[in-house]
């Protein structure tokens, strides 16, 4: 994966249901040619009652993947993600998430690249209704939840 230039189409950092093995990955990532690289960003993550995570601003490490879609499918794939995340455009009052640019650190190499990430807008709702995930890894949280219910 190359370092981003200003004119590049930014990869997307995914940290929840868009990760491989979860339902939204099958519908919104897998159908498009892409590369995925394990990575981390800074933030704070909560598991919401609806069954998916909400990312807030924070200083913890959030574990996920950088997904880089092939150039010929990039716009279509990003439009699908915007729809899934209820993102209508910058500053739109209907947005559930905002799509912002943050630095992500690739696992293994430590290379830092700019990525898009979807961050939840209603911080109060997330903090009041969500379960904070202190280790920042939603996949691990879901595995622990499943194991504790067996």
Image (tube, grey):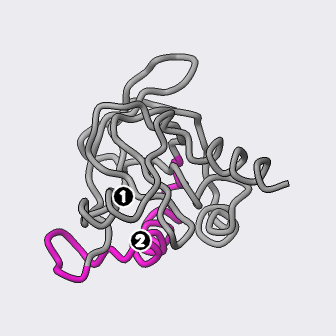
- Relative placement, left or right, of 32 versus 64 is right
Name, please, the residue furthest toward the bottom: 94
Q: Which mark is residue 118?
A: 1
- Relative placement, left or right, of 101 versus 130 is left
- Relative placement, left or right, of 141 versus 133 is right
- Residue interval drawn in magenta: 67-94
- Residue hosting label 2: 85
- Relative placement, left or right, of 23 versus 44 is right
Q: Identify the residue shown where x is 76% and y is 54%.
A: 146
Mark 2: few/some/many CA within 10 Å (<14, 14-19, 20+): some
- Residue 132 % position (x, y): 44, 47
- Residue 142 % position (x, y): 66, 51
- 61 to 122, vertically: above or below: above
Mark 1: few/some/many CA within 10 Å (<14, 14-19, 20+): many
Real-space CA distance between mark 1 and mark 2, rounded to the nearest whole angstrom: 7 Å
Q: Quarter-wise, where is residue 128 in the image? A: bottom left
**For this rendering, which residue is in front, 4 or 43?**
43
Evaluate if marks 1 and 2 touch, with contact meaning CB atoms under 8 Å apart: yes
- 42 to 120, vertically: above or below: above
Give the structural element (helix, strand or loop) at label 2. Answer: loop
């Amino acid at each position: 994966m190359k370092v981003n230039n200003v004119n590049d189409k930014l990869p997307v950092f995914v940290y929840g249901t868009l990760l491989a093995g979860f339902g939204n990955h099958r519908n919104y990532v897998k159908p498009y040619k892409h590369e995925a690289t394990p990575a981390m960003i800074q933030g704070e993550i909560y598991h919401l009652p609806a069954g998916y995570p909400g990312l807030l601003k924070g200083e913890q490490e959030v574990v996920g993947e950088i997904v880089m879609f092939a150039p010929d499918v990039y716009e279509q794939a990003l439009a699908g993600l915007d729809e899934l995340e209820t993102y209508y455009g910058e500053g739109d009052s209907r947005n559930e998430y905002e799509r912002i640019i943050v630095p992500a650190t690739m696992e293994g190499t430590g290379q830092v690249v700019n990525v898009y990430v979807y961050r939840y807008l209603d911080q109060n709702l997330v903090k009041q209704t969500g379960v904070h995930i202190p280790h920042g890894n939603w996949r691990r949280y879901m595995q622990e939840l499943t194991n504790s219910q067996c």
